[in-house]
Amino acid sequence: MSTTLIIFLVLCLVLACSFEFVNGFHDTANAVATVIYTNSMKPTVAVVYSGFLNFLGVMTGGIAVAMGIINLLPMEVLVDNNVYHGISMILALLLSAIIWNLGTWFFGLPASSSHSLIGSILGIGLAFYFLPDNIGGSAVNWDKAKDTGLALLISPLAGFSLAILMMFIFKRFIKNDAIYKEPIPGKKPPLWIRMLLWTTCGLVSFFHGQNDGQKGVGLVMMILIAIMPGYFSLDNSVNLQSINANVQFMQSAILKADTTILSKKEMISYNDLQNYSTHFSNETSGKTKSDDVDIATRFSLRKDILKITKGCEKLIAGGNLSLSKKEIISLKSEIKSSKKLVEYAPSWVIIMISISLGLGTMIGWKRIVKTIGEKIGKQHMSYAQGASAELVASIGIGVATRFGVPVSTTHMLSSGIMGSMVAKRGLKNLQKGTVINIVLAWVLTLPVTILLSGGLFLLFRAIL
């Protein structure tokens, strides 16, 4: 690599860590808001506690969400012979996401880092269509974008509704009036309330690390694949002949299909699958690890696996494959197994992001804490309201991580606070001005980051 490329690589990695650092003090402030505001834990202890659990969350969260981020943009479309095109993509999406996150944090608005990142990625994909050398290739994985968008849309609605339900459950089973009172400045609540809030804060922090931390891992992998595709397209620890066996099984299974009942789109997937399978088998013949493959060929093997697995999934979803239920189950198992070659992240990437998120959690929390505790409802947040909102948020984030979809910690928790306020005295208990500002930040995040990242992408492509 030239000195210039090394400088750009380091710059992109620093920006990725910066995004995760900002994510730490922007999003995790939601997690520590309740224990700090209710005097259940000293601020310095709370942020260290939350930061450590965020670190553990990233380390134990796997990479399903990270792969969801990577798959929003088909790398096989955006990565070409000019490495500076990849650098333009990475710089644009990172800068736009960081700018929006810092702006909303400055005004104390609990906006979503997830939305800012997703918007920035979609902005790159949409801007791709305006490039003069674009020959019509799709630059957005719309199937994945729909799934991601649905998860991000549902999260605030779920947080709001479930927090109302949680408050009713609290009132039904916990008769101690102390938990429904507002915190007295400088006075600690009873020990059992503090323990409850410690637990809910810890759960939100841990699951935030598992979900949001993986987004940072996905960002770093996008950087590495875009700038050094020959070295990071494939996991060198995976046996190529094992993957080749998966590919041949899928190819053989699909060949059994009755092509006369397949639709036009399904026939395209069918033919592509056969072609990419044959190419993969030929290129990996006699080779054990990706290091045995020529550097220039490795990215094409990644493309083969992505096309093969996606084609199989589309054919299965179409419902026209003339295969038995047992054969479909086996086919799905082979699809999952073959993805190991391309869905991975080196340990150093996960550790780097874990540290960035953990450190970010330990600063910058005050602005968001005040908004969460005092400015959403007309009355200050009670112990029960804080606990119910955090329980709902931790459950929602945990479920989303289980299914490998990115979800907004901010939306889950702040909408949960709104729901807990409504559960007490109805909609009139919300501070209209603050709620409007929060919702406005939510609504504007996607279009602003889409336009900002798209514009920066086209600008960087023109000058780099």
Image (cartoon, rainbow, N blue to C red):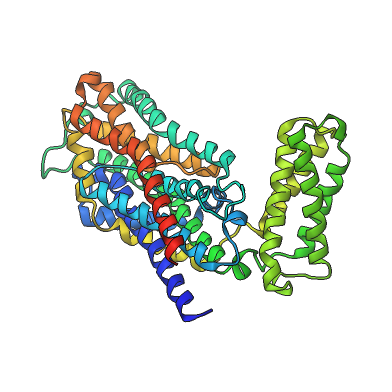
Q: Is residue 38 visible?
A: no
Residue 66 location, x and y as percent?
Answer: 52, 52
**101 or 128, which lies in front?**
128
Task: Give the answer, above or below, for where 164 lies relative to 344.
Answer: above
> Which corner quadrant holds the N terminus?
bottom right
**242 or 17, which lies in front?**
17
**303 or 354, which lies in front?**
303
What residue do we see at 79% from left, 38% from top? 267
Task: Give the number of callouts.
Answer: 0
**63 or 264, which lies in front?**
264
**In-image side of 63 versus 394 (left or right):** right
What residue do we see at 80% from left, 52% from top? 275
Task: Give the answer, above or below, for where 328 lies relative to 241.
Answer: above
- Residue at the farthest left position: 185
> Which corner quadrant holds the C terminus?
bottom left
Task: Give the answer, above or below, for where 445 lies relative to 166.
Answer: below
Residue 152 figure quarter: top left
- Residue at the farthest front position: 132
What residue do we see at 79% from left, 66% from top? 284
**In-image side of 59 versus 187 (left or right):** right
Q: Is residue 402 visible?
A: yes
Task: Give the answer, above or below, for where 380 lies relative to 311.
Answer: above
**In-image side of 436 versus 242 (left or right):** left
Residue 65 location, x and y as percent?
Answer: 52, 49
What residue do we see at 71% from left, 52% from top? 337
Residue 107 location, x and y as percent?
Answer: 20, 46
Residue 328 location, x and y as percent?
Answer: 78, 38
